[in-house]
Amino acid sequence: MTAPLDVLVVGAGPTGLALAAQLRAYGTGFRIVDRSLDRVRESRALGIQPRTLEALAGFGVTDALVARGNPAMRLHLHLTRRTVSLPLFDIGLPDTPYPFLLFLAQAETENVLGEHLAARDVTVERGTELIGLEQQGPHVVCRLRGRDGTEETVTARYVVGCDGAHSTVRDRAGIDFEGYAYPHTYLLADLDVDGLEPGAVHSFMTGGGMLFFFPLGSPAPWRLLAVRPSDAPDGKVTLPLLQGIADRYGAQDLVLRDPVWMTDFRLHNRGAARYRSGSCFLAGDAAHIHSPAGAQGMNTGIQDALNLGWKLALVCRGAAPRELLETYGTERAPVGREVRRFTDRAFTIGTSPHPVLRFARSQLVPRLAPLVMRARAPRAWVFRTASELGIHYRRSPASTTGPRPPRHGPRAGDRLPDRPQGLQARTAAPGWHLLLTGPPHLWPDQRLAPVLAGREDLITVHRLGERSPWPGVAQALVRPDGHLGYVASGTEPEGLRDYVARWLPTDPA
Ligand SMILES: Cc1cc2nc3c(=O)[nH]c(=O)nc-3n(C[C@H](O)[C@H](O)[C@H](O)COP(=O)(O)OP(=O)(O)OC[C@H]3O[C@@H](n4cnc5c(N)ncnc54)[C@H](O)[C@@H]3O)c2cc1C
């Protein structure tokens, strides 16, 4: 009998590709299958958030994304009588190397991830569909159907459903997908527009709703996004229909032309009741779908993958206990719920026909917009939230605060900031990173020996001296996904030793 595969990744959208990149970085045995014969050619998700850029930097793909993308630094809010220009992401992001929202078509993002995998001899098995799975003891027995119709049985230790909103893995694992559909239909088009200032996001706002133009670049200069007005004709999306809608939103000076892709779709807000059933996990759209307000969907999916991948890799390698896998749902399900709530609010404010919100859009926003410019704290909060830099796992069992936690600086469960600059790059290599601050002579090798014994290949030690995110003498263990697992002050290694013994035991169960 052949040994079971470590991980079967079902779905090669952005979530599955990011998971594959991480499993590859750890040398885990895996296969990645996708039922479609070709990768996505449509633009779909177009905003990459700073936290996603940080998280992908460890694989060396972020530079390629940034080189191909288009950072937008301003939002032009076109109101009935005037235009207000707001800086985007200009505050609240002092601790990231990527303080901008990067616009790049999803097709390009997948292309970059695909090239990364191909360069590392990973083949995405296209035309291969998961048609069934069954948990048998500790393993999952999966049935795959190839492009020529032949079926194959694969036994895997773990299966990850990165297979989108209509996930087969979720369905076969018996996990409910709870939520609701919005009554509206969205209109989407990638096209060229005469009359728009390049390099900015444009929003046309009326009591009836909002119309957006995002600077896409490729495959067309602009992405149009709007709610189809309730009295607009149903049916195929055409250029005259979109021009008519633009005119109604007060964008009559613009000329829409040369569409590359036009479509409409209904939006849902749903979440998986659980992120795991036995040895099956869900990530990305398979676990949560919501409105595109705030450009969160693809980003949350990629970050799900990067939370799970290293845990699976270490458990499969026998370097971490199976208990570590339980922290995936504990950490990521609240993030998914919060994204659904945040996008629902933004979507409702932007589209609701409720008279109060209509009034707010048509009357209050024009008056309040200049004040918003000056309201630094709320703007910083919005950017911090949208950028996903504020996501933390402080309540996770894998986040431990040791004795006398530092009064200032990031806490256990927070992401490691890039402060001082270059710290994230220094800790980007796969594995865990132990940061020791204060005078280096306080950290002789023999002090660390009980912590590191048997884990030398998993933990890299950095003596930071005074250039540290914490004042004074501190010790912090950074997880492979850039979040802090353990933080304490002082030089006593016992708390750290206990943390490492729990999550990286030399004899895991
Ligand atoms: C028309 C459209 C417009 C969108 N616009 C935006 C936007 O503006 N902003 C935004 O943030 N998001 C947008 N999205 C959502 C965004 O595309 C998703 O959030 C993102 O693709 C999720 O990535 P994923 O990898 O989790 O799932 P997906 O990209 O859906 O990938 C799932 C993959 O799994 C494969 N698969 C499914 N079932 C099986 C099976 N049984 N066996 C094998 N393979 C399988 C599929 O072929 C697919 O390749 C849009 C989506 C659509 C459809």
Image (spheres, rainbow, N blue to C red):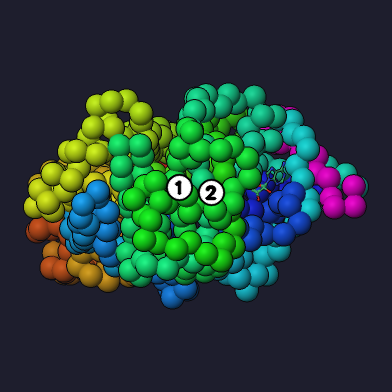
Q: Where is residue 99 in the image (x, y as percent from the top left)?
A: 28, 63
Near-viewer residue (497 or 55): 55
**Mark 2: few, some, or many residues within 10 Å (few <14, many ≥20)?**
some
Q: Name the residue under label 1.
A: 245
Q: Report x, y in % for residue 129.
A: 77, 45
Whether residue 144 appears in magenta in the rendering, the answer is yes
Badge 2 is on which residue? Answer: 241
Residue 96 or residue 290, whichever sits in front: 290
Q: Is residue 32 visible?
A: yes
**Which element carries disc 1, helix, strand or loop?**
helix
> As drawn, is 133 to the left or to the right of 289?
right
Magenta residues, as a range? 136-149
Q: Is residue 403 above or below residue 119?
A: above
Q: How crowded is mark 1: few (under 14 residues within 10 Å), some or many (20 or more)?
A: many
Q: Residue at x 56, y 55 (%)?
A: 239
Q: Measured along the vertical axis of the image, is residue 142 above or below residue 376?
A: above
**Tag 1: residue type?**
Ile
Indicate the quadrant where residue 339 lies. Answer: top left
Q: In this view, does 256 lie above or below 294?
A: below
At 62% from the left and 74% from the top, the residue drawn is 119
Hey, what amino acid is under mark 2? Leu
Q: What percent of the width, then of the height, locates residue 316?
A: 59, 48
Evaluate whether residue 72 shows in this view.
no
User: Does dot 2 land on a helix, a strand or a loop?
Assistant: helix
